[in-house]
């Protein structure tokens, strides 16, 4: 198994449950080595609501957190929604250590996030 910093990242970009929702399903590590891929996918399409599914993310480093915060800023200034789903303890602790977890709406499941954003 490669070190976490070299683990690949795969991103599945799918339509959400309602028009204007976009879901990014991540698998792997969101780190400096996968940052360009992550950022370019974030910027590829504009959606009213973006849900990022972290269920299969093993690790996030400060570069990945920086990209998430950048996405949050872009979505917030345009009045759009950004939510995180399936965040494991390791990723949540990284968000807490960097004191950015309060910026994100975090849901246990994709369905919860879709229903909350729909409302």
Image (spheres, helix red, strand yellow):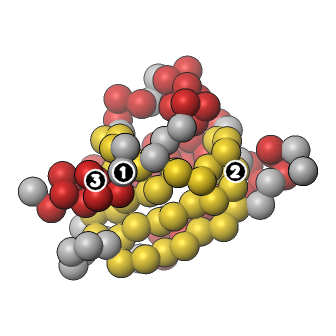
Callout 3 crowding tier (Cα within 10 Å): few <14, some 14–19, many ≥20: many
Residue with the mark numbered 2? 29
Mark 1 lies on a secondary structure that is loop
Residue with the mark numbered 1? 109
Rendered residue at 55%/21% (across/down): 97
Residue 53's spot in the image, x, y percent?
Answer: 47, 56
Q: What whole-number distance in Å separates the C-alpha atoms at marks 3 and 1?
A: 7 Å
Work out which quarter of the rendered image holds the C terminus and state it: bottom left
> Looking at the image, which is closer to me, 44 or 17?
17
Residue 39's spot in the image, x, y percent?
Answer: 57, 62
Q: How many marks?
A: 3
> Looking at the image, which is closer to me, 68 or 73?
68
> Looking at the image, which is closer to me, 73 or 100?
100
Mark 2 lies on a secondary structure that is strand
Residue 57's spot in the image, x, y percent?
Answer: 61, 50
Residue with the mark numbered 3? 113
Of labels 1 and 2, earlier in sequence is 2
């Amino acid at each position: 198994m490669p070190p976490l910093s070299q683990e690949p990242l795969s991103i599945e970009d799918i339509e959400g449950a309602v028009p204007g929702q976009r879901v990014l399903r991540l698998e792997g590590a969101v780190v400096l080595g996968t940052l360009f891929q992550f950022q370019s996918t974030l910027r590829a399409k504009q959606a009213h609501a973006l849900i990022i599914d972290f269920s299969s993310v093993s690790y996030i480093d400060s570069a990945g957190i920086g990209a998430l915060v950048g996405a949050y800023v872009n979505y917030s200034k345009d009045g759009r929604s950004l939510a995180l789903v399936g965040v494991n303890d390791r990723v949540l602790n990284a968000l807490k250590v960097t004191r950015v977890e309060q910026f994100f709406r975090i849901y246990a499941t994709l369905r919860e996030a879709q229903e909350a954003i729909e409302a």
